[in-house]
């Protein structure tokens, strides 16, 4: 019988080596897989390329990784944490800034067998024209820039070519998961999680509630087990309440 | 940059007043995305009987009012990461579908703040060089929404016009703005050109002209 549940987070995450690229779910701290991120810090993994929408607003989760100097490159739309920018301007971390919808689609297509796509988002801006600093030098000047995007005219409008992201690993947080790896998310904690699961070649999912196979109804599975390799329990399983107001 | 303008005072609308003026133009059934700042003041002024569905970038269609602290749920936030609620009939989607809604032309209006708007409807609202760059969904929103309505103070804190011939701050999008609501006036962009459609109560067209650094036509026709 297929059983992807693993009780020992640390031994499973041994597979993630320093230098790896990680597609990470979450929007701020909502739906962010902090159990997995903490475990990678505890395993002393470094030189990581994180693909995640935000660093967050404090030193938990991705913020902890930053504070401990474990991030080589961040691909994100809205980092937030001021200390991230201190590291960026000091040349200690690379920053690939991507429109949020482009980031989501790059993760989705990366896991969908589509190498690249055209989008109108960012056309005619410094995120597409090769002038945004990817990395600063020790002298405070830009040492490398994000590449200039190829463009194409569709219907009289400029579009930019964006590449799909296939990450070495995907880190996902879900509300429920069964032992086969089928996942169900809850409310807006879904956000980037299904996409991080699609982008990663090998995917770890931390879940709040472990279910037996068959307990999730087929119509309620948001990310099917083919995208998920390992299921682990999230350390945070605080009770939730319904929020419909009218 | 232009020098601070010191010609006569112009007492226009408050931030709430700008939001209320914009809210009068929302139509029943519109699907709308609201940015941070003055845009978040808009919902309280939507007229009774006008049903507007709010979209949030993090995957909410049918966003309700902010959640009171005792009902905050870490699994339900708005795009500003604040505790949120849902209206009855709301839908939750992942971030890729959320931006399919945005880019695919399924938003009637996106309401955004701005650093600058140009004479041709270019928008700069994501980055002040020297500060911390972050873009979020702004470039997707202006690329995909059917209408892009800017709400902002007419001049910056130093009194410099924010409506300018060409933006000096980095662009969010070219020729994307369709309307501008400020404390002094409402502009529409038609045929790639700004048109002054109305002045706030008690504000003369000359006062708007003095505080605007872009060419525009006056067009007070309905």
Image (cartoon, rainbow, N blue to C red):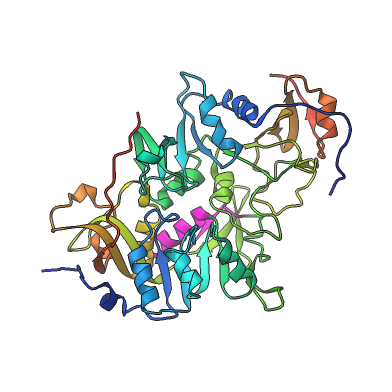
Name the image quarter holding residue A104.
bottom left
Q: Quadrant of the C terminus of chain A?
A: top left
- Residue A163 coordinates in the image, percent (x, y): 50, 65
Asked if residue B146 lies in the magenta stretch, the reply is no
Q: Residue furthest left?
A: A1
Residue at 72% x, 38% y is: B192
Residue at 54% x, 53% y is: B136
Relative to B166, B137 lies left or right = left
Q: Quadrant of the N terminus of chain A?
A: bottom left
- Considering only vertical position in the picture, is B98 above or below A106? above
- Residue A171 coordinates in the image, percent (x, y): 35, 66
Relative to B208, A245 lies left or right = left
Residue at 48% x, 74% y is: A68
- Considering only vertical position in the picture, is B17 above or below A205? above
- Residue B9 coordinates in the image, percent (x, y): 83, 28
Name the image quarter holding residue A226.
bottom left
**Looking at the image, can residue A112 be seen?**
no
- Residue A127 coordinates in the image, percent (x, y): 62, 60
- Considering only vertical position in the picture, is A120 above or below A62? above
Residue at 55% x, 56% y is: A99
Asked if residue A117 lies in the magenta stretch, the reply is yes
What range is drawn magenta here? Answer: A100-122
């Amino acid at each position: 019988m297929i059983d992807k549940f693993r009780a020992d987070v640390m031994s499973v995450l041994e597979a993630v080596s320093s230098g790896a690229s990680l597609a990470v779910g979450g929007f701020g701290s909502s739906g962010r897989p902090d159990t997995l991120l903490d475990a990678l810090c505890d395993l002393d993994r470094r030189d990581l390329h994180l693909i995640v929408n935000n660093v967050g607003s404090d030193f938990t989760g991705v913020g902890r990784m930053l504070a401990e100097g474990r991030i080589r490159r961040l691909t994100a739309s809205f980092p937030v944490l001021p200390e991230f920018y201190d590291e960026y301007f000091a040349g200690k971390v690379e920053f690939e800034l991507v429109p949020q919808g482009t980031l989501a689609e790059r993760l989705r297509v990366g896991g969908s067998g589509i190498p690249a796509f055209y989008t109108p988002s960012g056309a005619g801006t410094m995120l597409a024209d090769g002038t945004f600093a990817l990395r600063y030098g020790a002298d405070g000047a830009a040492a490398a820039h994000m590449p200039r995007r190829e463009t194409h005219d569709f219907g009289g409008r400029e579009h930019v070519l964006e590449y799909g992201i296939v990450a070495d690993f995907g880190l996902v947080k879900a509300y429920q998961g069964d032992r086969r790896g089928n996942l169900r998310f809850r409310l807006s904690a879904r956000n980037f999680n299904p996409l991080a699961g699609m982008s990663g070649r090998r995917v770890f999912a931390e879940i709040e509630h472990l279910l037996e196979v068959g307990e999730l109804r087929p119509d309620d599975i948001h990310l099917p087990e083919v995208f998920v390799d390992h299921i682990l329990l999230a350390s945070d399983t605080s009770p939730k309440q319904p929020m419909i107001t009218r | 940059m232009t020098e601070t303008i010191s010609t006569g005072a112009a007492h226009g609308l408050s931030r709430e007043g700008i939001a209320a003026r914009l809210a009068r133009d929302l139509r029943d059934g519109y699907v709308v995305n609201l940015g941070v700042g003055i845009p978040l003041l808009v919902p309280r002024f939507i007229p009774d009987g006008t049903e507007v569905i709010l979209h949030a970038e993090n995957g909410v269609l049918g966003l309700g009012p902010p959640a009171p602290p005792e009902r905050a749920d870490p699994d339900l936030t708005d795009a500003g990461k604040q505790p949120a609620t849902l209206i009855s009939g709301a839908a939750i989607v992942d971030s890729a579908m959320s931006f399919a809604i945005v880019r695919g032309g399924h938003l009637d209006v996106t309401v955004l703040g701005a650093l600058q708007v140009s004479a041709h409807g270019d928008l700069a609202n994501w980055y002040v060089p020297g500060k911390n760059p972050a873009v979020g969904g702004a470039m997707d929103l202006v690329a995909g929404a059917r209408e892009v309505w800017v709400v902002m103070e007419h001049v910056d804190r130093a009194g410099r016009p924010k409506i300018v011939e060409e933006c000096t701050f980095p662009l969010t999008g070219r020729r994307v703005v369709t309307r501008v609501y400020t404390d002094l006036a409402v502009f529409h962009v038609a045929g790639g050109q700004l048109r002054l459609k109305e002045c706030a109560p008690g504000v003369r067209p000359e006062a708007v002209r003095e505080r605007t650094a872009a060419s525009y036509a006056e067009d007070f026709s309905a």
